[in-house]
Amino acid sequence: MSYHKMLSLAPFVLKLELNPEIHMKTFKRFCKYIRLKDDPKLIEEYKKLHAKGACWPEITEGMKQVGIIDMEIYLAGTNLFMIMDTKVDFDHEKAMAQLAKLPKQAEWETLVSKYQETNHAASAGEKWRVLERIYKMDKSTKMPLRALY
């Protein structure tokens, strides 16, 4: 594609970038962390509990029921980092209290607590600490044309 042809497309691309409907917020995001016990064997077991298809279906369904849309957990050493996307009107405290009362949830929390640096009787809402966001990329900044190619 020629440089002039790319320039003629640039206003269209920029218009799409700035369209507020594309950037409408459709979820709320929470980032959380917790520590695992410093035992490689226990960490491997914990990873297996969270492997695809291994988490109890009641746990996943319970999360959906309280408004959690998506969740990912990442591991770095003994540190777990969770990204939790929820419905826009999600009330964290209320949802975590509701989640704790669902069938199988207390049993699951007791099971996973043997791997976590936490009180075995604590609920998920008590164990996982919500992180404070200190940076967000400014998407309103206009990019130079050369960055579009």
Image (cartoon, helix red, strand yellow):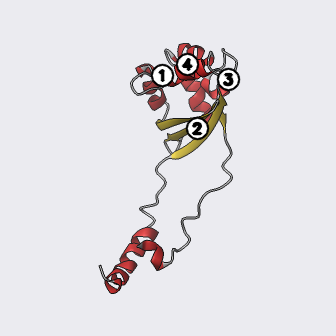
Q: Relative to the observer, which residue lies in front, 91 or 131?
A: 131
Circle 1 Cα neighbour tier, 10 Å, few/some/many (<14 / 14–19 / ≥20): few
Q: Secondary structure at mark 1?
A: helix
Q: Secondary structure at mark 2?
A: loop
Q: CA distance from mark 3 to mark 4?
A: 30 Å
Numbered disc in front, either 2 or 1: 1
| Residue 91 numbered mark, or none | 2
Q: Within 10 angstroms of label 4, few (less than 14), some, or many (20 or more) residues?
A: few
Give the numbered dot on residue 112.
none
Residue type (three-letter) at the residue carrying disc 4: Lys
Give the label on residue 101, or none: 4
From what the image shows, is residue 97 above or below residue 11?
A: above
Q: Disc 3 marks which amino acid?
A: Asp
Q: Which residue is mark 1?
A: 48
Q: Are marks 3 and 4 in contact (CB under 8 Å)?
A: no
**Between discs 2 and 1, the one toward the N terminus:** 1
Which quadrant of the figure has residue 98? top right
